[in-house]
Image (cartoon, rainbow, N blue to C red):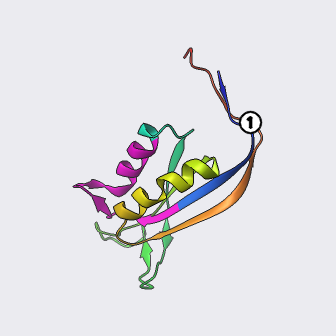
């Protein structure tokens, strides 16, 4: 059984739904890479509206198939693992933003028997 509790780092990667890396959605490429690197887990969140560096408003209300909604990839792990992977993430991203903050993990269990 793997147990991850205590002080760790929450990394949030802010990108757009239409961002790509090697012909696949960037968020999928990021999650696949994080999984292969042994991170504790990652979650992709799709925003309903937002804007970025160019101040272009993106929303799901518009009848536009290319709305390019905001995407956030969240991952919690050790500072060392996040620092080690950061150059690869930077190389995959064309634009966007990455934030880091301290996070206290209260409960995380992974039962390897499942």
Crowding at mark 1 (Cα within 10 Å: few <14, some 14-19, many 20+): few
Picture coordinates of residue 65, whole percent (x, y): 28, 66
In the rendered image of this protein, does residue 26 appear above or below residue 96?
Answer: above
Where are the magenta residues, as a range? 13-34
> Where, by quadrant of the figure, is residue 105 drawn?
top right
> Is 96 or 80 nearer to us in this picture?
80
Find the residue positioned furthest to the bottom.
55
Picture coordinates of residue 62, whole percent (x, y): 38, 73
Residue 74 seen from this side: no
Picture coordinates of residue 37, whole percent (x, y): 45, 40
Which residue: 60% across, 50% down? 80
Q: Is residue 79 magenta?
A: no
Circle 1: element type: loop
Residue 103 seen from this side: yes
In the rendered image of this protein, does residue 74 appear above or below residue 3?
Answer: below
> Where, by quadrant of the figure, is residue 36 drawn?
top left
Residue ID for mark 1: 107
Please state, as top left, top right, bottom left or bottom right, where the N terminus lies in the image.
top right
In the rendered image of this protein, does residue 105 appear above or below residue 45?
Answer: above
């Amino acid at each position: 059984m793997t147990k991850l509790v205590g002080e760790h780092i929450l990394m949030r990667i802010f990108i757009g739904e239409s961002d790509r890396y090697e012909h696949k959605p960037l968020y999928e490429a990021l999650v696949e890479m994080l999984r292969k690197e042994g991170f504790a887990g990652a979650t992709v969140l799709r925003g309903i509206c937002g804007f970025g560096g160019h101040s272009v408003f993106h929303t799901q209300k518009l009848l536009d198939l290319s709305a390019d909604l905001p995407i956030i990839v969240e991952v919690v792990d050790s500072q060392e693992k996040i620092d080690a992977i950061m150059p690869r993430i930077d190389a995959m991203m064309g634009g966007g933003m990455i934030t880091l903050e301290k996070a206290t993990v209260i409960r995380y269990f992974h039962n390897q028997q499942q």
